[in-house]
Image (cartoon, helix red, strand yellow):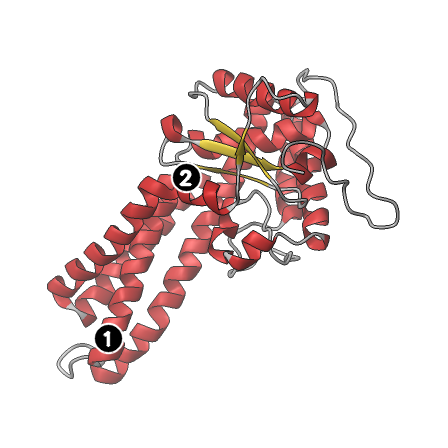
Amino acid sequence: MNHLKTFALMAALTALFVGLGYLIGGTTGMLIALAFAGGMNLFSYWNADKIVLRMYRAIPVDESHPEPLIRNYVADIVQMSADAGLPRPKIAIIPTEQPNAFATGRNPANAAVCATEGLLHALTREEIRGVMAHELAHVKNRDTLTMTVTATVAGAISALANFGLFFGGDRDRPGGMIGTIAMALLAPMAAALVQMAISRGREYEADRVGAEIAGDPQALASALQKIEGWSRRIHNPTAEHNPASAQLFIINPLSGQGADNLFSTHPATANRVRALMEMAGRMGGRRPTPAQTPAAAPRAGTGVPPTPRGPWG
């Protein structure tokens, strides 16, 4: 159902582009707008992993790391990648206290998965596995490609809208000048809403596939609740300065939202947890997973996880 919803929304976005292009720019205008948006997003698609990893000062890690916590983190990702039939991704740690994680890369062969140092110290090993399985699911589902195509069409719609505002429209076209300008104002909003709806759908699907990869929907559900709680109290300065990157994370690293809404790139955590618990019930309990690693206790009187030890600290 999530795949069907994504296809339907992308079809609606394409129809909006074609309709707006016909009314405002004609065939030539449509091609110019599509080429403009496509060029920008193609660059991002091929370089997103390098750009994002550099932006968040991600530190590569492997099995030789001196910290047992990091070695377990790497070992679990390597094992789950193999179980899911994926190439081994680049594995990194982000030096921030806010518990969170994301995946990037244009395809499974060029993927990178990252957890923040706060995540590794706030969750149990089972919960960390659940979170990283969700990120591997994004890689497996090629969600970077899906969202790049979506962003390209949405960007083309915005470009067409700018053409309409600058050139005003033609009285001979349906709606005349006023109708053209109205569409130029409303179409980008509609495109953004569809783009966000697609993003929410991909998160639900990554939850489902990630729970299958890790074999433990309950652990992922528990992790989502913990991450949301911490993200409301601990700022992520890099994400705050680069809000466009917020959609990469498993939980919105900016201000938390209380419900699914049209203007959110992430579904409400309560809705995601409910779906995962229903999935756990259908699976008939948990599949055996590695023993839990206790989470570090918060700093006394602060409610903030301790700053992890290691080369980034």
Q: Give the image location of residue 258, x and y in percent.
A: 66, 57
Write the residue at 57% across / 58% down.
Answer: 240
Residue 180 visible at all: no
- What amino acid does circle 2 point to? Asp
In terms of secondary structure, where does tag 2 sit? helix
Q: Position of residue 287 (x, y in %)?
A: 66, 17
Along the viewing direction, whichever of 53 and 128 lies nearer the viewer: 53
Classify residue 128 as left or right of residue 9. Answer: right
Q: Nearer the viewer, mark 1 or mark 2?
A: 2
Tag 1 secondary structure: helix
Q: Amino acid at mark 1?
A: Gly
Left or right relative to 299: residue 258: left
Residue 186: image tag: none
- Where, quadrant-wise, is the N terminus in this rendering? top left
**In the picture, residue 86 is in which quadrant?**
top left
Determine which residue is flagged by label 1. 164
Q: Identify which residue is drawn at 34% across, 68% down.
A: 187
Near mark 1 (Cα within 10 A), the count class, few <14, some 14-19 or many ≥20, is many
Q: Residue placed at 59% from the left, 36% from the top?
A: 115
- Residue 89, image x, y percentages: 46, 26
Q: Mark 2 = which residue? A: 49
